[in-house]
Image (tube, grey):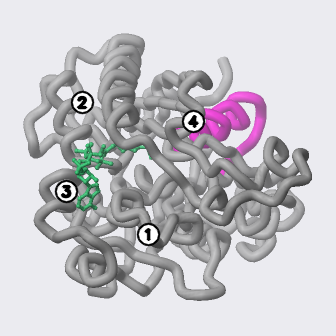
Amino acid sequence: MSPAAVVSGLGAWLPERTVDNHQLSTVLDTSDEWIRTRTGIGLRHIVAPGESTSDLAVAAGRRALESAGTTRVSAVVLATSTPDHSCPATAPDVASRLGLGGIAAFDVAAVCTGFVYALRVGAGLIATGADSVLVIGADTFSTILDPEDRTTRAIFGDGAGAVVLRAGAADEPGALLGFDLGSDGTGADLITVPAGGSRQRSTGVPAAEREHYFAMAGKPVFRHAVLRMSESTLAVRSAVGWTGVDRLVAHQANARILAAVGEQLALTEEQVVLNLDRVGNTVAASIPLALADAVVDGVLPPGARTMLCGFGGGLTWGSAALLWPDLAVQAPPRHR
Ligand code: COA
């Protein structure tokens, strides 16, 4: 039987600069009240000029390696949709800066589902012979937001989170027990950066400036998110044979989405992990950042039947189930 992928380390990192709702409302037509009521978000962390996705990924990766008590892994899989450059991938640079040597390192792009996709890829590498894999989710969406778009600027923040997977047995705490991944390309236009890719560049016509910014159709995305996240988590719960779930640690896009999915899983408010009030939607970093905050806050106990779930651009979605392991985790830095 092929080995199981076991979560053996967890780390997270946030850039130092923060922007709270009151600060946003001084430059945009918005308010703390609107943002909190419609999304649950209170604060987001934003990279400084010159700071990039790889900087956050290296810091989170280092913490995950420390948490796992190791300095070596067989591969790095980096989930990001804001790589340092459109070519090459960012993961090789991250692996080198972490001193990991000439190992396999590549990016996975599935926007807000990126971390769950990357976990699945990491588990696949372990099933086919890798000893251990560093899986990182890191994004700096502040670098692609339209400065005049009050909706997206209210929601997105920057950050990174990472786990170490090692080869182990399926009955160990931390073993990834089941996955569900999906996509629907007919919804590609709902979450997009219209310009900058081959579709636009091949025309030879320079893009209008705003087309380089991220755009999202909030309402349909909201509806798709609730539906797909509910279906996906229920599918994994049934596939792994659980009668219930103790903790939902899902992509932190909107507190109302998380409440609706929690309801489908018959969870109480306390069983749905929320940290978006302090970090906003950090895209591929969202789930590992929420895991790290939950461990540090003592709301994710070892042994909890834990469901991870992401939803995002593509459209893409995915879930994974594990019994939460006993890990030493440092608090993500907060600079409030
Ligand atoms: N401050 C004040 N008003 C705002 C605002 C802001 N930051 N952003 C939008 N509004 C306004 C809109 O302009 C609109 O005004 P109008 O009625 O005069 O046209 C009104 O608020 C309602 O906008 P709407 O888009 O219908 O709000 P909503 O309740 O759908 O909330 C989102 C918007 C983006 C928060 C919500 O749709 C959402 O969370 N979508 C899902 C995001 C997601 O899951 N992403 C995951 C993948 S990344």
Question: Pointer 3: residues within 10 angstroms few (<14), some, or many (20+)?
Answer: many
Amino acid at circle 3: Gly
- Say whether marks 2 and 1 touch (CB < 8 Å): no
Q: Is residue 15 left or right of residue 50?
A: left
**Of residues 67 and 35, the one drawn nearer to the viewer in this rendering:** 35
Place residue 73 in its image quadrant: bottom right
Amino acid at circle 4: Asp
Residue 40, numbered circle: 3
Label 4, label 1: how far apart the Cα atoms are? 20 Å
- Say whether marks 3 and 1 touch (CB < 8 Å): no
Residue lying at 66% horizontally and 48% vertically, measured from the top left:
194
Q: Nearer the viewer, mark 3 or mark 1?
A: 1
Q: Which residue is mark 1?
A: 148
Q: Which residue is mark 2?
A: 261
Residue lying at 71% horizontally and 73% vertically, measured from the top left:
98
Q: Which residue is mark 4?
A: 189
